Amino acid sequence: MPWRALLRLVDFPAILTHWASADLTSGGPELDAQATHESRGAEFGRKAILRVLSTGRATIPDVHDLAWFDHGSASQENGTAWGGDTDRNFFEALRMTGMPNSPMRRLLPHLGESDWIDIGPILPGKGQVRVERGAYGPCSVGLVKPPEVRDLMRYLTFYSTGIDSQNIGYNLLAAGAKSILARMAVFRRPGVFVAFVSSDSE
């Protein structure tokens, strides 16, 4: 599967609460090499929901699959997707601008980084739920909390004007990120993030 990426507003409590009462144990047919992104996303997302509801932990691959599942099953106005080598090179250049503790590092973590974020109890009797941010193997997961969005916007604006920016920040904002980040300003509850997820099988 070629490289692809998604920037999306993801409400993890809403996803897990909505699907908790659904029968997710009986999936569709087995996936083969000809399966579409949509069918793969639905199946991987279904399995990720089952794991998170069972363990209370959403690992990097789980968060990746939940974001794509949400994009395929809910409003796509809250997300924008990219794919291919040109876009991958663009985002790798943007990733390299992220110094430790910068807003960009939370959106585009470096390989080997990992931290866990507590989003609180989702279902009665299930305890706390945690989601993992970081980059491991073919998957990268960035998560930006609502209070961090303003700093991220400032960072992207700076990298749209810097002499060495190559319009990186501007290009990301123009590609759909600006409206998504602006929409994030209305959310203040735990478990809602601006998520950037990417994967590459190569």
Image (cartoon, rainbow, N blue to C red):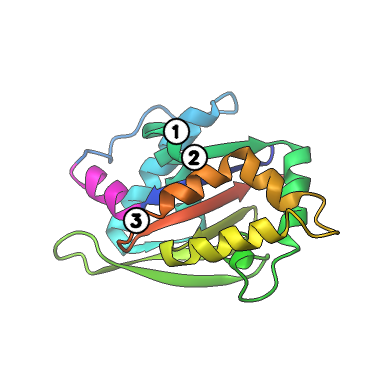
The quadrant of the image that shows the N terminus is top right
Mark sitting earlier along the chain (1/3): 1
| Magenta span includes 14 | yes
Numbered disc 2: secondary structure: strand
Q: Which residues are magenta?
A: 12-21
Q: Which residue in the structure is indicated by mark 2?
A: 79
Looking at the image, residue 105 sits to the left or right of residue 88; the answer is left
At horizontal 31% and vertical 47% (from top left) the residue drawn is 15
Q: Is residue 176 above or below residue 156?
A: above
Residue 116: x and y, percent? 45, 71
Quarter of the figure with the C terminus: top right
Find the distance from the CA under tag 1 to the CA under tag 3: 18 Å
Which marked residue is nearer to the observer: mark 1 or mark 3? 3
Q: Nearer the viewer, residue 37 or 51?
A: 37
The residue wearing badge 3 is 187
Please give the name of the residue rendered at 79% of the width and 60% of the height, measured from the top-left corner: 162
- The amino acid marked with disc number 1 is Gln
- Residue placed under numbered mark 1 in the picture: 76
